[in-house]
Image (cartoon, rainbow, N blue to C red):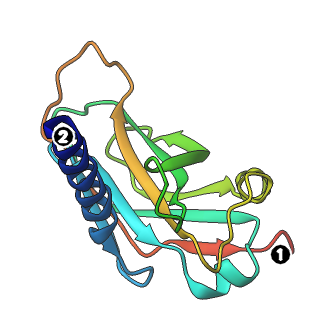
Amino acid sequence: MWLNLIVASCLCCLHAVQTAAFEKVVDSSSGVTLTETQPVARIRLPASIRAAPAPILEVPVVRISNPQEMSFSIFASLEWRRSAQASTGNEKIQIGNFTVYPPDRTGSYMLRASTAFEKLKATGVDLGRDQVVILLEMKRTNPNKAWSAVQVEIAPLRWQSDNP
């Protein structure tokens, strides 16, 4: 009996941790800041993209503070948790990544998102019902080198069609 209570308590805690991770999602109309101490951001997928996914994701990097010119990359993924209570956690499909070079130069980076959306559909995810966010992760290009102070501001993400 005690074992059942312990297992039930652990499962409740696990659910609370999973829920908390998705509570830190910013609105799609907001920008985000990634730093060496907070290298991850989750951005709500806009309703228009949920209804009809656009093929290209534009990531506008508008400001960088990187005094030691630490080399870094930004990875973009679709992350989701199924609405079913039996879900075992968050899953993700990578959209793409880019390395900012020089490591203090701003710019807009285009990533093809259509393949990730196709893979997402193939898993049975329902964009209207399941929680899906854009996950941005900043990573060092050399994982053996310690982080230095890096701050990257990203304006609201933009979605583009293939047609110019």
- What residue do we see at 45% from left, 79% from top? 28
The spot of residue 2 in percent (x, y) is: 13, 38
Vertical side of 98 occupied by 64: above or below: below
Q: Is residue 11 left or right of residue 84?
A: left
The spot of residue 42 in percent (x, y) is: 38, 62
Vertical side of 42 occupied by 95: above or below: above
- What residue do we see at 63% from left, 64% from top? 57
Residue 164: numbered disc: 1
Q: Earlier in the sequence, mark 2 or mark 1?
A: 2
Instruction: Give the residue furthest to the top.
Output: 144
Q: Is residue 36 left or right of residue 137?
A: left
Report which residue position mark 2 lands on: 1
Kindly report which numbered mark, 2 or 1, lies closer to the viewer in this rendering. Answer: 2
- What residue do we see at 76% from left, 50% from top? 119
The spot of residue 77 in percent (x, y) is: 54, 51
The spot of residue 3 in percent (x, y) is: 19, 35
Instruction: Give the residue furthest to the right.
Output: 163
Q: Is residue 46 left or right of residue 163?
A: left
How many numbered discs? 2
Which element type, helix, strand or loop, lies under badge 1?
loop
The answer to whether marks 2 and 1 mark residues whose Cβ atoms lie closer than 8 Å is no
Q: Nearer the viewer, residue 66 or 111?
A: 111
Q: Quadrant of the C terminus?
A: bottom right
Q: Quadrant of the N terminus?
A: top left
- What residue do we see at 44% from left, 38% from top? 101
Amino acid type at mark 1: Pro
Amino acid type at mark 2: Met
Q: Quadrant of residue 67?
A: top left
Q: Decide: few, some or many residues near mark 2? Use Cα within 10 Å; few <14, some 14-19, many ≥20.
A: few
Instruction: Give the residue furthest to the front.
Output: 1
Which element type, helix, strand or loop, lies under badge 2?
loop
| Marks 2/1: CA–CA distance | 64 Å
